[in-house]
């Protein structure tokens, strides 16, 4: 069963819905039917949403594999909490300010670190299985 991964997948889905909503609000208020209309803020809203859609699914696959292979539930919860935090601060920093921001930098760095930890943890599980 994927109880822990399912919980974080649900939270992260709410974040994606929130990001999608922000794109819809931008398009309605700016009267942009498709795309970003060349609006810099719109571009950042759309990229923030796309960035979440690019990173969250792969990370959830890594979490699910680790959980299915009897991974440490405390590590999984710690990484899940960190991922939710990272995916919240990333778009807040990304949309609010052009260029480097605290949220954009640390949201990305933390997401990459979580993915790396999960990749290594799954690799270690595999090595333990074949040995």
Image (spheres, rainbow, N blue to C red):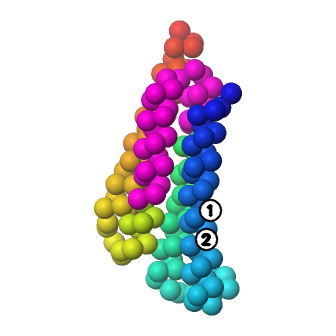
Q: Is residue 104 above or below residue 69?
A: below
- In space, the residues marked 2 and 1 are separated at their CA atoms by 6 Å
Q: Which mark is residue 58?
A: none
**Farthest-out residue, bottom:** 31
Q: Is residue 97 above or below residue 9?
A: below
Identify residue for label 2: 21
Give the image location of residue 66, x and y in percent.
56, 28
Tell which of 20 and 40 is nearer to you. Answer: 20
Is mark 2 in CB contact (under 8 Å) with mark 1?
Answer: yes
Q: Is residue 22 above or below residue 14?
A: below
Q: Is residue 68 above or below residue 47?
A: above
Residue at position x 52%, y 69% in the image: 47
Q: Is residue 66 magenta?
A: yes
Give the image location of residue 12, x and y in percent.
57, 51
Residue at position x 63%, y 32% in the image: 3
Residue at position x 42%, y 60% in the image: 90
SS majority, magenta: helix
User: What kind of element bears circle 1?
Assistant: helix
Residue at position x 52%, y 80% in the image: 42
Tell which of 85 and 94 is nearer to you. Answer: 85
Q: Which region shows up in magenta?
A: 62-89
| Disc 1: CA contacts within 10 A as few (<14), some (14-19) or many (>=20) | few
Give the image location of residue 124, x and y in percent.
48, 21
Q: Is residue 43 magenta?
A: no
Question: Is any atom of residue 48 visible in this view?
Answer: yes
Identify residue for label 1: 17
User: What kind of element bears circle 2?
Assistant: helix
Give the image location of residue 19, x and y in percent.
56, 66
Q: Quadrant of residue 107?
A: bottom left
Tell which of 15 and 129 is nearer to you. Answer: 15
Q: Is residue 10 left or right of residue 47?
A: right
């Amino acid at each position: 069963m994927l109880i822990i991964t399912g919980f974080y997948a649900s939270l992260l889905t709410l974040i994606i819905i929130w990001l999608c909503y922000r794109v819809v609000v931008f398009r309605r208020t700016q009267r942009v039917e498709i795309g970003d209309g060349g609006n810099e803020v719109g571009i950042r809203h759309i990229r923030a949403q796309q960035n979440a859609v690019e990173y969250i699914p792969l990370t959830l696959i890594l979490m699910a594999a680790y959980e299915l292979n009897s991974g440490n539930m405390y590590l999984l919860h710690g990484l899940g909490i960190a991922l939710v935090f990272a995916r919240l601060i990333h778009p807040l920093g990304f949309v609010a300010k052009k260029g480097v921001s605290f949220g954009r930098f640390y949201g990305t760095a933390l997401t990459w670190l979580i993915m790396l930890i999960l990749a290594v943890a799954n690799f270690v599980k595999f090595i333990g299985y074949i040995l």
